[in-house]
Image (cartoon, rainbow, N blue to C red):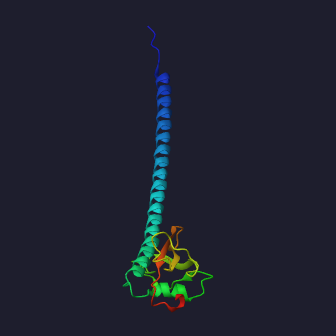
Amino acid sequence: MQVRNNRGASDQQRGVVLVIILVILSSMSILVLGSGSESRLESAIVRNDQFRVNAYRVALSEINAQIQDININAVTEDDEAILQLIYRDNTKPWELSENELRGPAKGKGAYTQGVALSVLCDPDHCPAPAGYSLSGNTKVLRARIESSAQLHDTGAQSSQAQSFWYLLPQSGITTFE
């Protein structure tokens, strides 16, 4: 009786199995590394989006604070910002200094802010919108507040603008009487 030696075939099968296992492990490693970099990319996108949203909030809160500051005066008082808009050269926007900012950030912290006010039409020739004219002779000021905020050392920024109408008092501002 002759016995065959299958030991060579068994070694070959082990080698093939080992190669297959190595290929599977290599492809799994590549997949894991790829998904990790995708996760980092997604987190970077989310982080950048959060920075942009915060820049939007800083810019918008400054607009809201400026409008609130204008609206807080009594009816008989002339607002300082409105007087500045009326009496200055309005060929270019009035850039507010850091001390004139009214929003919560006030130009300090992580954001660089810029705020400008501009007149959109001459009060002597600015047509009053419906409901604003008192006996057809009330003068109005149409203006715009532009606010921008940029996070230091990043590209995250936001620029916002808000136009508004301001009813000028019939007494108190002598240039329009």
Residue 47 percent location from the top left of the image: 45, 61
| 157 and 94: which is toward the camera | 94
Residue 159 percent location from the top left of the image: 52, 69
Q: Residue visible at 46% across and 66% down?
A: 51
The image quarter containing residue 120 is: bottom right
Residue 129 percent location from the top left of the image: 50, 70
> Across the whole image, how many numbered discs are drawn on residues?
0
Specify whether residue 98 is in view: no
Q: Residue visible at 52% across and 76% down?
A: 142
* Image quadrant where one finds the N terminus: top left
Q: Residue at the top extreme? A: 1
Q: Residue at the front extreme? A: 135
Up-down relation of residue 129 to residue 94 (above or below): above
Up-down relation of residue 152 to residue 38 (above or below): below
| 134 and 159: which is toward the camera | 134
Residue 10 percent location from the top left of the image: 46, 24
| 35 and 109: which is toward the camera | 109
Q: Residue visible at 53% across and 79% down?
A: 116
Specify whether residue 94 is in view: yes
Q: Residue visible at 46% across and 29% down?
A: 14
The image quarter containing residue 57 is: bottom left
Up-down relation of residue 1 to residue 25 (above or below): above
Residue 77 relative to residue 27: left or right: left
